Amino acid sequence: MIRCNAWALRSQIEDLCTNAKWKGMEGHGPIADCVHQQLQFFRVNMAASMASQAISKGLRAATSKHLFLDKFKCTRLSPRRWLNLQEYQSKKLMQESGVAVQRFYVADTASEALEAAKRLNAKEIVLKAQILAGGRGKGVFDSGLKGGVHLTKDPAVVGELANKMLGFNLTTKQTPKDGVKVKTVMVAEALDISRETYFAILMDRSCNGPVMVGSPQGGMDIEEVAASTPELIFKEVIDIFEGVQEDQALRMAANLGFKGTLQRQAADQIKRLYDLFLKVDATQVEVNPLGETPEGQVVCFDAKINFDDNAEFRQKAVFAMDDMTESDPTETEAAKWDLKYIGLDGNIACFVNGAGLAMATCDIIDLHGGKPANFLDLGGGVKEKQVYEAFKLLTADPKVEAILVNIFGGIVNCAIIANGITKACRELELKVPLVVRLEGTNVQEAKRILSESGLPITSADNLDDAARKAVAAIKK
């Protein structure tokens, strides 16, 4: 039921952001318009639904960029998953669910990679650098080695290649310009692929549950297939109570082009993938390619798994594998305190409770000629310590020239916010202008705390007034 409630929440949030009419902001709601891309702020991982919609449109959300627009330019932000798993970790989960994958080992040193290659005793070996970015095959290492994926029949070459990968930065089209340091490599058995197909299971809002999506045209970007040959995209809606039925699995296998005994084998893999989907509380399991080998095997050669962040409490082992080394350090620190933070390129820091209100705050700052420096959602159950830690994050950003606090307290006690603000201002010796707008529960007590603090805090009557004063503060 948690997943169903999450979808209901998404619908309510979208309706709110679509219909909201903030004072003077008609036609100025770009942040709200991006709600489909920004729903991870609610810690509800809905990336899978966007991927499903994208397949029909030929635009794949999993590879798109989030856009925060203003009147003068747009800022591009790379999409971020709350749970990041390396390729080998996803394959390990698949292996544990009986899904057919290549035999593989993981190595942290060149000597371990060489030993793994020998143990595989395979006709051909593939060596893959493990980073959380696509385009590894065409990437370049700062060691001079070209390509993060290499094939060889000689185990000795694996050791030599690993020596040029491990400890060096790999730069691809999806990494920062300086690349990402490679700390682990995967040494796997290389299998010939006689035919490639695409298969995915994902949550689809329009169907109120999981959907299978497949195409006989695999091994390529699925958006290209959807755009050029949409008739080759097949969908099967899964009854959340009944699961994948035998006839559904066989029909999908046939649509993917598997014949004879391979059709039955592919159907079995499809059902096992759905078992994995449920077992780990996934929102998406995407296999590209789901391949057919000359020896008559159906193998999942590559996979991407997205997880429902709300299920962390029952997926401790999975979430413990989270690789945070490549995440933005500020976002990582914010997550420790259950703060939803996304850095932007402006100079007015936003300190807000509620994602919808945070988006509105960003928009109205833009309306008054300012630029938001971040998106920060405190959430509903905020504590004084979280307020303090949030201020630490905001003041650590050298771009921040003013801070705008916008609190509409329903379940949030405004006095807690006020105590956190005064504590942070004193202990952090706040040097930038601070504008505070408070409304809601215990607001009079909160305003008394702020007024008696003796701190240079500018109060605001409403959101419009707060944004205007924050913009004016940085122009002085």
Image (cartoon, rainbow, N blue to C red):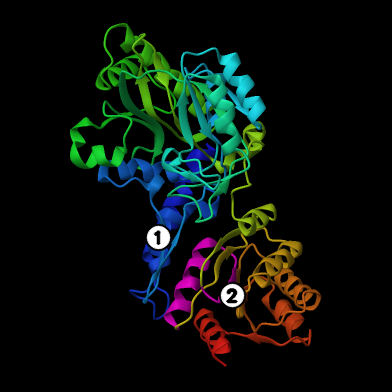
Q: Secondary structure at mark 1?
A: loop
Image quarter hosting the C terminus: bottom right
Residue 119 or residue 356, whichever sits in front: 119
x, y percent for residue 84: 56, 42
Q: Residue furthest right?
A: 427
On the picture, is 302 further left or further right than 317? left
Q: Is residue 403 above or below residue 88?
A: below
Residue 137 or residue 84, whichever sits in front: 137
Question: Which range is magenta?
Answer: 346-368
Location of mark 2 (residue): 399
The image quadrant that residue 165 belongs to is top right
Residue 61 or residue 122, whichever sits in front: 122
The image quadrant that residue 121 belongs to is top right
x, y percent for residue 2: 54, 39
Which of the two discs, 2 and 1, labels the residue nearer the N terminus?
1
Tell me the residue at 51%/55% (across/down).
Answer: 176
Q: Amino acid at mark 2?
A: Lys
Q: Residue furthest top?
A: 261
Q: Is residue 363 magenta?
A: yes
x, y percent for residue 463: 52, 79
Would you say the residues marked 2 and 1 are in contact, meaning their CB atoms lie under 8 Å apart?
no
| Residue 34, numbered label | 1
Tell me the residue at 61%/59% (across/down).
Answer: 379
On the picture, is 426 further left or further right than 35? right
Q: Secondary structure at mark 2?
A: loop
Tell me the residue at 76%/77% (across/down).
Answer: 422
- Which of labels 2 and 1 is toward the front? 2
Q: Is residue 2 above or below residue 21?
A: above
Is residue 74 something one can see in this rendering?
yes
| Residue 126, numbered label | none
Q: Amino acid at mark 1?
A: Cys
- Rounded to the nearest angstrom, the CA distance separating label 2 from label 1 is 24 Å
